[in-house]
Structure formats: structure tokens, C-alpha cells
Image (spheres, grey):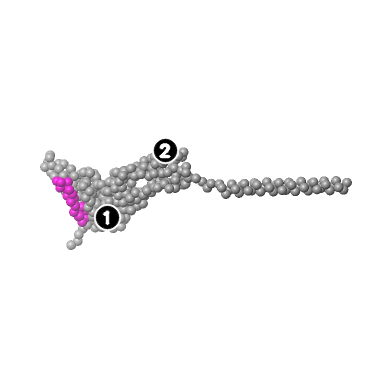
Amino acid sequence: MFTQETNFNTDIIMKNLLYSICFGLLMGVMFSCDQSDQEVAPVGSIEGYATTVVTNMSDVTSFNEGDTLLVKVSLDKWLDKDIYFTLDVTAETGDESDISYNESDLVFPAYTSEIVIPIVILADDVVEETETMKVSVKMKGDEQYYAVQPASVFPTYDVTINNVNAEGVLTVNVGWDNPNNDLDIYIFSDIVGLLGGAESSDNPEICTDLYQAYYDVLYDEHGILLENFYLLIDPYYVEGDEVDYWVAFGEPDGTNTYFNDCTLRVKDLDDNKYIYDEENEVGGYIVMSIHLDEDGDFTFEQIDPHVVVK
């Protein structure tokens, strides 16, 4: 009896020991496999990412106002999702207000190999000199991290904008420092009266109503030459007793003439320098005399609209 009980207990102990050894070996194998998998797992390949190529299709970076810069964006393989780009403009003497583009043109549709982004250089009738800015097309958001090769190059273009004045007319700008003020401007002929003007809330006010053809518009019928004109300013609203303003003239051939640091003292204006058109119910004080010659060239003389005490 004693011997049998001892053998029975021994068998139980051996079985438990065997189970423990097997369980330990199994856990060791599982841990070893898991650890091995972690060590050899790949970080992530970018071989399947598309490569982006950005090209200036215009082949130039110097543009006249009214021209269009065409930027082409190409991918070397189709993607199954839309990609979004953004236009990055770094202001120098010019800024984003000098160009126009559509946001929809910056979307690269899925299953497409290329898009062309038109960037229009605005013809704004602002009399100014040559301007420059930096323009680049770049990825928008984080799409580049899972769709486009990080090595893709997005060039920056140094864009030059050449001013272009309106054809066949004198472009007149009048601007002022205080944005709360509001001046209106008019062009008068010394013979036929009001020819045009600008009476918006814009700053500067822009007028393109004095045509080169006015020189002889009445000559054939009446022998009258239209060659002398006036620029008038109506101080529609002015804070305080005076407003500092400037005048710029842009001729069709690209010649620009500027009169800076002008002052309109609203409580000291000479009524003899005031012209009023009853039919159109507009008027203003003469600040410039404009002469047009037979060659279509303009000359300018500044006139003081204030009462001069001698």
C-alpha cells in the first residue's frame, strides 16, 4: 500500500513538472517570435509614391500687365485621390493683389497625370513702375507625406511685372494718405465741359476718360482743337482741414509722371478755381492743367487751388 501511494504522488509531480516545462517553452517561443517580428518589420517604403514635376510653361518670368503665367504640375503616376496645391506669393514691390487665379485650378484630380494653373497678371490701370515678387506652387497640407516623393522639387519663380498703361487714353490716378477721406476727380475740357471722372470710394481714384483722339475730334466740323484740359478734385469727404494727396499720369507709350506731396486745404480754396457742370451736377477745384499736342503727347502743370494771400 505504501509503495503504490508513493508512485501515484510521484507521477502527479512529474506530470505537473512536465506541464510547467512545456508551458514555459511555449511562452518562450511565442515571446521570441513576437520579438523577432518587431525587430525585422519594415518602417515603410516610399517607392510607390508619385514624383511631382513643376514647370513654367511660359518660359519667361518677366510679364506685362494682362499676361498670364502658366505653371504645369505633373505626376509620374496616377493617384487614387485628389491632391491639393497652394500658391505661395512673397511680396516684394508687388504682391498678391497684382495677380489673379482660381482656387479650383489648384486641385489635382485623381487619375490625372498633369494640370495647368493659369496665374493672370492683372491690368489694373494703376500708374506704377516695374514690380517684382516671388511665386511658387506647393503642396497643401500633409498629402506629400503619403502620396508624393519627399524629393519632389517645387521651384520659386522671381516674377517681374511691367506696367502697361491703357491704350489711346491718359490714365489718371489720384490717391491720398488718410483712408477715411474720400475724393472724387473729374476731367474737364475748356471747350466742351465734363469729359468723365471717378467718384467711387476707391483709393486711388482712377480715370481713363481723356482720349488722345480728343485733340482733333471737333476740328473737321468746326475748326476747334481740343488740346487744353483740367483735372478737378472734389473733396467729397475730408477729416480735418486738409488732405495730403498725390497725382499720377500714365501715357499710352508707358511714360509716367508723378506729382507727390500735394495738399488740399479744404477751408482755404479759391472759388475762382472751381468749375461746375450744371447738366451733370458735378464739379471740383482745378489742381492740374493738361495739354495734349498733335502727336498725342501730354504735358502737365500743377495749379494751386488755394487762395493765395499776397
**What mark, if any, has residue 5 been given in the picture?**
none
Q: Position of residue 61 (x, y in %)?
A: 31, 47
Q: Residue furthest top?
A: 111
The quadrant of the rendering that contains the C terminus is bottom left
**249 left or right of 138?**
left
**What mark, if any, has residue 112 been given in the picture?**
2
Q: Is residue 270 visible?
A: no
Seen at 27% across and 55% down, the residue is 245
Number of on-image labels = 2
Mark earlier in primary sequence (2, 1): 2
Seen at 28% across and 52% down, the residue is 175
Q: Position of residue 158 (x, y in %)?
A: 33, 50
**300 left or right of 52?**
left
**What mark, if any, has residue 245 been given in the picture?**
1
How packed is label 1: few (under 14 Cα within 10 Å), some, or many (20 or more)?
Answer: some
Q: Main secondary structure of the magenta part?
A: strand
Seen at 47% across and 44% down, the residue is 47
Q: Is residue 62 visible?
A: yes
The residue under label 1 is which amino acid type? Tyr
Q: Residue furthest bottom?
A: 310
**Magenta-colored span:** 282-305
Q: Position of residue 119 (x, y in %)?
A: 34, 44
The residue under label 2 is which amino acid type? Thr
Does the stretch in magenta take in 287?
yes
